[in-house]
Amino acid sequence: MKPLVSILIPAYNAQTCLAETLRSALAQTWENKEIIVVDDGSKDGTLALARSFESDVVKVFTHNNQGAAATRNKAYSLSCGDYIQWLDADDLLAPDKIAMQMEALVDPPNRKTLLSGEWGSFMHRPHRAKFVPTGLWNNLSKAEWLMLKMEQNTYMQTATWLVSRELSEAAGPWDTRLLGDDDGEYFCRILLASDGVRFVPGARVYYRQSGSTSLSYIGASDRKRDAQWVSMELHIGYLQSLERSERARAACVTYMQNWMVHFYPERLDIFEKARKLSRELGGQIEAPVPSWKYSWIQALFGRRLARSAEFRLRSLRWSMTRFWDKTLCRLEWRRPTAQSL
């Protein structure tokens, strides 16, 4: 009997895209699978849509709104799989994604091997997804993977991973304190429990970009800023537990510097904490400098107004881009399904 793979889908107000996501999960060529959808108290037709897919393979549950991390914990508690495939309710898996990763395991499989794969982003047309390799698209040790993530300000999308139940149990539950970066922190703990990362070329995930409506978008939310800083402190602690070299300390400082644009000047308390921590690590972070597009606004009206203009213009640009992509999608002869990815 081949190992059972649990595909876990937390869903909140995902009526417009959940059907496509579920079809991509059902289309997996790895036959021994279960699909578990947990509705996080959606206010639209998400639950009814999910239940229209119920079968021996697809199981649907619901609970009162508790947030993404708690919903993922609920989905995991209901699963039985030997391996776990996380999948957000608006993303897609290529049909052979899971099969390629499972086949990459040695025989007998090492349950401490953490499997990753390729991911590309799209808006409305998955066949137009752009797959852009980063330094993380390689077989890497734990310390090297985490250092590259922090040095290069990059990441792996949630659904790229395929995780054994042994690693999942060792890592523990998703941290419900965290908001936008709960996945980044969770997979750091998975990584620490593993023997390293095996990258599987061709095992593809299609990540739907949602801009300012995404959970990962911080914007002007103080709750998200607080949660992001907690996640960052945890990231730094995880790397320091693996390696305390000069390069590791420098990677932590670079990581903080890259994220200060989200805290300065609105949250000087967090900025000062980061400066103190960077000095303890032998480095120094500086106040972020706005791009030339907004520097003249800062010179005339101050940093806060420049930041407000930046938020508004980015949101407007994103909305226009999504509108244009959706228009092109409607003009095409057909919209590709998950089976044609």
Image (cartoon, rainbow, N blue to C red):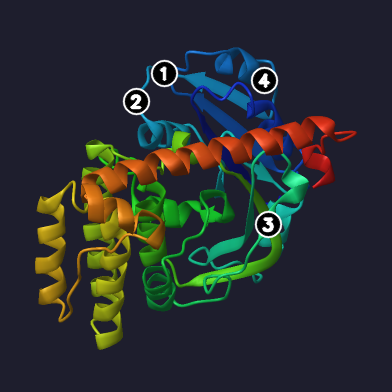
Residue at image location 87% in from the left, 33% down from the top:
334
Looking at the picture, tell me which residue is in the foreground, 125 or 178: 125
Classify 10 Å Cα crowding around label 2: few (below 14), some (14-19), many (20 and above).
few
| Gap between marks 3 and 4 measured at Cα | 32 Å
Are discs 2 and 4 less than 8 Å apart at CB? no
Q: Please provide percent x and percent y for residue 93.
A: 68, 46
Of the image marks 3 and 4, the number of the one nearer the N terminus: 4
Q: Amino acid at mark 3?
A: Lys
Residue type at tag 2: Gln
Secondary structure type for disc 3 = strand
Using residue 70 as the reference point, say whether residue 107 is left or right of it.
Answer: right
Q: Nearer the viewer, mark 2 or mark 3?
A: 3
Asked where in the image residue 8 lies, by quadrant, the reply is top right
Q: Which mark is residue 130?
A: 3
Q: Position of residue 243 (x, y in %)?
A: 28, 80
Left or right: 199 as drawn, with respect to 151: right
